[in-house]
Amino acid sequence: VGKARDIAGEVAHEVKAAVNDAAPLVPGTPGSGTPTLEEPTTPTEPLPPKPAQHGPVPHSPTGAPSKDGELAAAQQGAYLTTATGVPLRDTDHSLKAGRRGPTLLQDHHLREKIMHFDHERIPERVVHARGAAAHGVFRSNGAASELTKAAFLAEGATTPVFTRFSTVLGSRGSADTVRDTRGFAVKFYTTEGNYDLVGNNIPVFFIQDAIKFPDVIHAGKPHPDVEIPQAQSAHDTFWDFVSLHTEGQHHALWNMSDRGIPRSYRMMEGFGVHTFRLVNAAGETTLVKFHWKPRLGVHSLTWEEAQIAAGVDPDFHRRDLADAIESGAHPEWDLGVQVFPDTPDQMFEGIDLLDSTKFVPEELAPVQVIGTMTLNANPGNYFAETEQVAFHAGHFVPGIDATDDPLLQGRLFSYLDTQLTRLGGPNFNQIPINRPHAPVNDMLRDGFHQHADHTGIAPYKPNSLDGGCPFLAGEDVSAFIDVPQAVEAATKVRESPLTYDDHFSQARLFYRSMSPAEQSHIAQAYTFELGKCYEQAIKERQLLALANIDAHLCQLVADGLGLPAPEPTVAVTDEAPSPALSQIGDTWPTDGRLIGIVVPDDVTDLSDVRAVRDAVFAAGMVPLVIASKGGMLTDGNGDPVAVQRTFLTVRSIELDTVLLAGAPLVGADADPSADAKAGAPSGGVLDPRVSLLLSEAYRHCKALGGWGDAAAAFEASGLPAAPAGVYIGDDALDVLGSVVELLGSHRVWERFPA
Ligand code: HDD
């Protein structure tokens, strides 16, 4: 603090000297030199640049200025103190008049401690309240450098990033695995200032114009009278809205598909949704759509897994991300662009690029990779980073600009506005997680939670008192220059372009691009969601919308609801399907997959278990040894094997596969009903918890395997004989190999009922 004061003193002195020496503004003012008529535009010695004008100096809550480039250290020193740094001897007892007497108003520590606690919560985000985030790095391969002058997209540029994933509808404490769109927001701390790519895991949006955002969110959020249901769209108001406002049908269909229940944040695509305008060094412009492609492929949960996880592990996605990063399986995404010529009509192959309810199939415009993001560090403090990070769709850098998409235009207003309430004032960019890594010299002053000790006396332009500082930048120092885009002479209207009227062709395209298994999941999702609605009229109206998307889909859902399937009401164009939209067909790396190894109590030789565990680990996956109780397993032949889950704490949903190192049988008395099962081995029945593990994993179409007595366990579990994707053999490592090969396809797809 002393040092800060010294600096402030020096600067004040310097400024005063400057005023006296160089800038007599009005005739008659004492001082030397010639009066300056114009604001200086270039740095002149000895005045600027001044040390105090290189952006706000961050201060920690304890008052110490942090070192350049470092986040403010929130806490220091060995002893507990008050917020004002006074060491404390006791924080367990309030100050009372005698041991059994009344508490005294004089207790300033009690007062401060409770006051601060009372205000620990801030308003949660109005949407995307539930989220998880990580730090990382973005490496550009330079492929976009012809299209944009953005420095972070130049060849070889590496840029720190902070990425937050989220659900949209649920409150901060809601479950991760609900059916919903996922937010995918990336903050790039570039050398030219922060760039935020605030996207979703779905390339289209519910509405075409931002003015409808409060409507769609009010409809999706819980009913306002009783605040039910939490974090889901399976209720009347949501389906009321999208069945009336049919531009929402396309996005709703994506939500009903497996994309609405991702397996992991690490296995989701991300989309910038809107079309953006890139500008290169020559001032030429191109239109692009941004895509994040996960290196692990796009994979989803089954609906039953998602529902079980919501109860058993509401932090399923958050835990998965943190564990993967912690264990070194750093998730990666390639950033790609679809590139379109910046034509006056801003259309491509008949698709309106300014309509965010439409996407451009990859078969028409391939995604070209321009760099890769690796997430490699978990946040140190959830509140400080994940909660306080403030994204803004208008945080652009030179070389990337907005288009006239009316959804994007409204967002450009909304994101700054919301932070005023959420983060308590206009200075949220000074919060460490939001602070640019580029120098800041902004002339924004004061306001709630101002952390910078701004010096100088002329935070305005033009000025001569601070020597004209800060100066306006030219293109040579990466100034942001708005694209001089022509705007057609037009009449002010509250209307949309006619191209926005087609609400069904692309929904149909999406549905018809799915494999039969994926289509059946979609039909089941609609049947579930509409089955949760009470109003008959809403179900019937949504069936009308489905009739316009696909007659078979409509029929399946109508059958499930016990209603007649209506005829279509509009003629829908049959676009060519886009195979790139299906999740099924390819094989993918298995990094970070969780391999459960069930070890029965009677296994006397653990060498296979050790070998499989080590091989799993060496292959970049996570082995979880599961036994009847915790602690260490020993066989006297080697190192003890640590147990990570017990039959009580494990549940199939957290595992990508289950391997049995034998048959975990329990005494015949333990479960007489199971004992009666045909084929139960004599001397015991399969532990019912392991039986549940196997039957769920089987139903969710996961690969399974086993060695030793495992065949007896599968026989006793009641699973079909010789089922697809179940490997039993004598060689444990061979079994592991076969199972991992199947894991590359994520599921044993042929097991899904047609
Ligand atoms: Fe939004 C948050 C993504 C349309 C208004 N939005 C928010 C977040 C994501 C998106 C990922 C969470 C950021 C974080 O992790 O902090 N939003 C989108 C996408 C949209 C979209 C991909 C359409 C293409 N949003 C949209 C519109 C509006 C908003 C049309 C308002 C007119 N969004 C907000 C917001 C939020 C927000 C209210 C809530 C918290 C925040 O901004 O910081 O301003």
Image: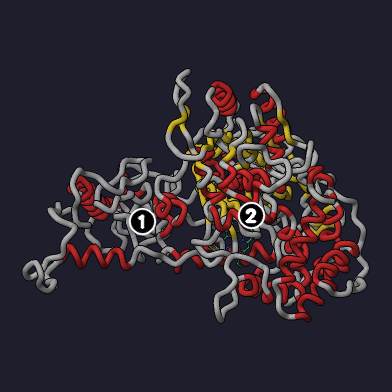
Mark 1 or 2 closer to N-term? 2
Provide the secondary structure element on which disc 1 rests. loop
164 lies above or below 331: below
Task: Report the residue at 40% width, 49% height from top.
Answer: 381
Q: Which residue is mark 1?
A: 464
Front in this rendered view, residue 593 or 110: 593
- Percent x, y for residue 181? 65, 58
Percent coordinates x, y for residue 670 in the rendering: 56, 47
Picture layout, residue 150 above or below residue 421: above
181 displayed left or right of 631: right
x 81%, y 76%: residue = 541
Q: Is residue 61 left or right of residue 256?
A: left
Residue 477 visible, this angle:
yes
- Check disc 2 and report the residue beneath it: 306
Task: Please state the horizontal and vertical placement of residue 96, each as a whole percent of the image.
Answer: 10, 68
Colour mapping: secondary structure
Q: Amino acid at mark 1?
A: Ser
Along the viewing direction, whichever of 117 and 663 lies nearer the viewer: 663
Q: Residue 663, how many percent across, how many down? A: 62, 34
**Quadrant hosting ligand 1:** bottom right
Mark-to-mark CA distance, 1 and 2 = 63 Å
- Give whichever of 238, 456 is nearer the camera: 238
- Check if mark 1's residue and mark 2's residue have beta carbons within 8 Å: no
Q: Nearer the viewer, mark 1 or mark 2?
A: 2
- The residue located at (22%, 57%) in the rendering is 83
Outermost left residue: 98
Circle 1 Cα neighbour tier, 10 Å, few/some/many (<14 / 14–19 / ≥20): many
Q: Residue 59, relative to residue 486: is it above or below? A: above
Q: Is mark 1 within 8 Å of ligand 1?
A: no
Above or below, comparing residue 202 to residue 329 in the picture: below
Q: Front-most of 470 and 208?
A: 208
Q: Does the image show residue 399?
A: no
